[in-house]
Amino acid sequence: MTQPPNQPPQGGFGAPQDQPPHGGGFGAPQSPPPPPAQPPQAPAQPPQPQPGYGYPSQPGPYAQPGPYGQPAQPGPYAPQPGPYAAQPGYGHPQQPQYPGQPQYPGAPGTPPAGPPASKGRTALIIGAAAAALLVIGGTVYAVTSDGGGGKKKPVAEKSDDGKQSSSGKPADPGNGKGNGGADPENLNDGRKPGEAKVLWYKSAPDAPGSGADAPGMWITGTTAVKAAYKQVFAYNVGNGNAAWDPIAFPQKICAVTPQKTADDKIVVAYMNGVSSRAKCNQLQQIDLDTGKKGWSGEVADGGLFDSAISIELTVSGKTLMVGRSESGTAYDIDSGRKLYDKEKYGSACFPAGFAGGSGRLVQVASCGAGGSNAHDELQELDPATGKVKWTQPVKKGWQVSRVYSLDPLVVYLTNQDKKAWNISTFTKAGKFRSEVKVDEKFAPRCDLSFLARDLQGCQGVAADADTLYLPTNATTGANQIVAISLANGKAKWRVKSPADESMFPIRTEGGKLIAYVQPSYDTGGQIVSVPVTGGSHGTTKLLQNPSGSAEIENSFFQGAIDWAGGRFYISSTRLTGSDSSKEKLMMAFGK
């Protein structure tokens, strides 16, 4: 039985592990990529240190109490640095990080912060009289919370750009004005036996000098869709032709649904202005296959410290959940009809984040902020009604920072005071199942988010019904993927990267783990499969990207990746706005 929501969890379990900063997503580090002529190992200028996620490492041989009310066990292993250790991006060296201090993304030389927050969430306001950002603790001095969601027509209009290239060969650019029929960079010239082709590639639209977000990437049976700055682009998956005219918005895109619905719908949020008081409150539904714009609406503010200055979006089934800093509003994603609000409950519990997918909707709440009873709580909600299925309190001091998997439910937690991390798994009924007990430094690839929780901001981690797959950290050379039992948290088997570069899980399918092996400066990346059952767990190469495109593949800034229909897709999630060279927005590889 879980404890009442207004009671602090008791006891602890397992051995949390130390938590140094992490290294961001696939692709180049936070500094702009080096000029094309410069080898990745020797960039033209030192890259900037990336914002850290988590906490500095904590020495000591003894286990600390865990977050879910089980007796602490000393354990045979000493705490190790956590899963977000610094990772070099595709051959580009990184500077050492100074853990534990706030940092704004892109600020050179500024020390990194504790768990970063989502770009789609407002700042957490501390106290009734003071306005202070709380990046680490995960608690909120909440005052009031009010939901709601009025509707209005968006100001969105179609882009003036024309169709994309009509050629099946790689074509540049990605702004809707490609001339087609050419491979100006000769990426497929000199392909070696067994290498796949660059099917197509697109350049990014112009972005401000300060940079711009390019969130999301959605692959359907016919289209590859990508958001970038103020536009959403769609390409034919096989040849890169324009699937539909780009959709342009009057202001920058500030949040997207990371998932698509079963019938290929997404929702995009964009700003309602450019002033310092502008809000991320304009919603637009889009059909990924046709480019047709569906319903639109405006997200209402909540209470005093609960505005829609920034939001996060997630989808579960037919439910779109729009999260503010202290509340959430659910809509029917087909019609835009408001379904329900999730607000304060108990004595002082406020929704702080949502994660959706696999038919499940999970809410993380911050309870008793600032008091002796301060703690997080996990809840599973019925996506259609918002009814609470179960509640699982988290021990004081622990924050639910990421959701690695929804089915099965696997969460990543951090503890600021102990400078520790923990990975815990749960049953369908919300009961604690196990924690990871592997003496290893893990390195999933997670968004460098800012200001609040980004529960679903990680790639490079996968799970099936019985096993969690995590990549180890390797500063040089090959790493490993460790298969961890969800029954007891122990390692079942390991597989080493087949190249002298790191390998990251993408997903499991058909009894196999699909993984991406990063490129080197002169060799393209790989897609491989690994049997998840039986006694042999060697890698089988499914796709070898060409050497001629390795430099560009390396350069994708905070890259999003996907493997679908025998094709590999990689795209930028952040545009630098540099005028020195044309940034690539997206590439597709195949046979």
Image: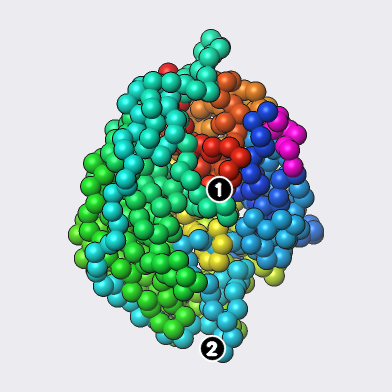
Which residue lies at the image location 72% right of the left edge and 37% below the top edge? Answer: 43
Q: Is residue 168 left or right of residue 9?
A: left
- The residue range painted magenta reads 38-45
Residue 52 in sight: yes
The front one of 126 and 471 is 126
Q: Main secondary structure of the magenta part?
A: loop
- Residue farthest to the top, as pictured: 193
Which colour style is shown?
A: rainbow
- Whether 42 is among the magenta residues is yes
* Amino acid type at image mark 1: Gly
Which residue lies at the image location 37% right of the left edge and 70% below the top edge? Answer: 328
The front one of 539 and 40 is 40
Residue on which the image places disc 2: 128
Is 57 rendered above or below residue 569? below
* Amino acid type at image mark 2: Ala
Mark identifier at residue 441: none
Residue 472 in the image: state x and y as whole percent: 65, 41
Residue on which the image places disc 1: 577
Q: Is residue 75 left or right of residue 177?
A: right
Looking at the image, is mark 2 or mark 1 nearer the viewer?
1
Quadrant in which residue 450 is drawn: bottom right
Which residue lies at the image location 67% right of the left edge and 52% below the top edge? Answer: 50
Is 274 rendered above or below residue 126? above
Q: Quadrant of the C terminus?
A: top left
Which secondary structure, mark 2? loop
- Whether 119 is among the magenta residues is no
Residue 168 in the image: state x and y as whole percent: 36, 22
Q: Quadrant of the N terminus?
A: bottom left
Disc 2/disc 1 C-alpha distance (Å): 39 Å
Q: Closer to the N terminus: mark 2 or mark 1?
A: 2
Number of other residues with Cα within 10 Å of mark 2, as a class: few under 14, some 14 to 19, many 20 or more = few
